[in-house]
């Protein structure tokens, strides 16, 4: 799982290869499905940066981000809160839930 994250980072940043955000997203999602919390928020950040290009992956990205947030990953909680504030990644705007996730992220440090 860690190797999937590292490969995703290499592809996203073009480290030692040509940058390929779509492939990077796929590797981050694979690691996130394997329970890697960092991979979930990396996938979400990348999908947000890619905008429409990642639209087909948005429900999967959101599900991984939610799972990571519930598992206590602070960055995932913060990003999920932001997505719920701004109705991103296919999530409906939900200011109450956004506030809850942002508060939990803040308490996590």
Image (cartoon, rainbow, N blue to C red):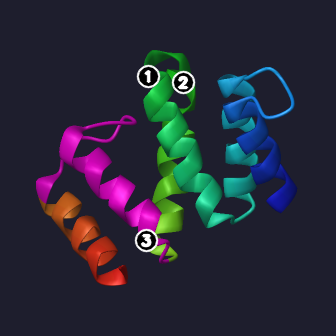
SS under mark 1: helix
Q: Which mark is residue 54?
A: 2
Residue drawn at x 29%, y 82% as measured from the top left: 107
The magenta segment: 72-95
Q: In the picture, residue 7 is in which quadrant?
A: top right
Q: How many C-alpha atoms fall within 10 Å of the one at disc 3: few (<14), some, or many (≥20)?
A: many
Q: Which mark is residue 51?
A: 1
- Residue 34 location in percent, x, y? 75, 61
Residue 92 magenta: yes
Residue drawn at x 48%, y 42% as measured from the top left: 45
* Residue at far left of view: 95
- Residue 16 location in percent, x, y? 86, 32
- Return the residue at label 3: 74
Q: CA distance from mark 1 to mark 3?
A: 23 Å
> Which numbered disc flags the more N-terminal residue, 1 or 3?
1
Residue 21 or 80: which is nearer the viewer?
21
């Amino acid at each position: 799982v860690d190797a999937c994250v590292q490969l995703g980072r290499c592809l996203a940043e073009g480290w030692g290869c040509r940058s390929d955000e779509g492939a990077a997203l796929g590797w981050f999602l694979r690691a996130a499905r394997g329970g890697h919390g960092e991979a979930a928020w990396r996938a979400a950040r990348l999908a947000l940066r890619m905008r429409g290009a990642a639209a087909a992956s948005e429900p999967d990205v959101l599900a991984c981000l939610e799972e990571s947030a519930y598992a206590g990953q602070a960055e995932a909680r913060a990003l999920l809160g932001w997505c719920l504030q701004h109705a991103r990644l296919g999530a409906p705007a939900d200011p109450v839930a956004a506030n809850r996730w942002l508060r939990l992220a803040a308490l996590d440090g």
